[in-house]
Image: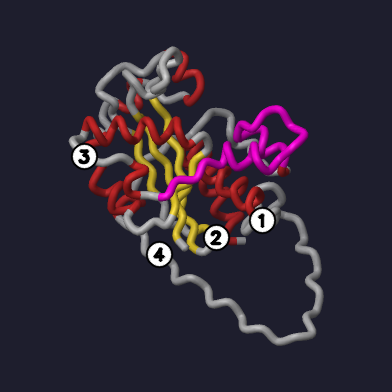
Amino acid sequence: MRQIIFDTETTGMNFNGRDKSEGHRIIEIGCVELIDRRPTERYFHRYLNPEQTIEADAIRVHGITNERVANEPTFAAVLPELLEYLEGADELIAHNMPFDQSFFNREFKLAGLKYKLEDRFHLLDTLDLARKKISGISRFSLDSLCKYYGIDNSNRTLHGALLDSQLLAEVYLKLTTEQSGFDFAAPDATPAPQPVETVSVAAPVPAAPSQPGAWLAIAVPDEEAAAHRAIMEKLRG
């Protein structure tokens, strides 16, 4: 099963309307791939030139300035490789899916596509899932869920699409099994001894690693690159 966990950062949002994307654009996309619930190194990450001004309130959230994205490609320019990356995904996962979904649909429309994200993919909202599965807490933000599950999000001083997608992958696995396929929170912990089985079972066949594509050649801020490398080292360890 191939699942893509993704997040976006934007120029802002329309606080007063039902469509939060109205009048705004995507400036960063981050995607993480899971194959049979295991992370791969095949990810998609792009900064985008929104062809409009980023609001000051949004910059305070994600730290992405107008100067940072002035020379980046537009959404339309990266759309072919994004669709290639998403092709064949069994499920797309995001936290507060309606928000990211509306921004994708707006960008699709501006790029001339005749379909919406939900027309091509099965979508899962981890915010909705968390509200259904967890009781006793009042907030279901990504930071709140990381705290609830003991996931280390100390690298998240600002919002960032790729780092947030990696943290959401951990939250998603906790939400769906209460047992993580990888551990951000305690990389140095000694694994607990496993009980001896009295029956023979076939060893699982590991999924073939995905081949990285052209989208792996990216330029990111030093802080985010360091955070990403640290996370990937934990996954490999």
Q: CA distance from mark 1 to mark 2?
A: 10 Å
On residue 210, the disc is: 4
Disc 3 crowd rating (10 Å Cα; few below 14, some 14-19, many 20+) is few
Residue highlighted by disc 1? 177
Drawn side of residue 167 relative to residue 192, left or right: left
Q: CA distance from mark 3 to mark 2?
A: 31 Å
The secondary structure type at the circle numbered 3 is loop
Residue 170 belongs to the span the image colors magenta = no
Residue highlighted by disc 3? 114
Q: Position of residue 67 (x, y in %)?
A: 33, 22
The secondary structure type at the circle numbered 1 is helix
CB under 8 Å between discs 2 and 4? no
Magenta stretch bounds? 122-148
Which quadrant holds residue 137?
top right
Q: Nearer the viewer, mark 3 or mark 2?
A: 3
Q: Nearer the viewer, mark 3 or mark 4?
A: 3
Three-letter amino acid code at the position of disc 4: Ser
Residue highlighted by disc 2? 37
- The answer to whether 217 is drawn above or below residue 210 in the figure is above
Q: CA distance from mark 3 to mark 4?
A: 30 Å
CB under 8 Å between discs 3 and 2? no
The secondary structure type at the circle numbered 4 is loop
- The answer to whether 50 is drawn above or below residue 92 in the figure is above
Residue at the spot 33% in from the left edge and 26% down from the top edge: 25
> Which quarter of the rendering shows the C terminus?
bottom right
CB under 8 Å between discs 1 and 2? yes
Q: Earlier in the sequence, mark 3 or mark 4?
A: 3
Residue at the spot 76% in from the left edge and 63% down from the top edge: 191
Drawn side of residue 138 relative to residue 25, left or right: right
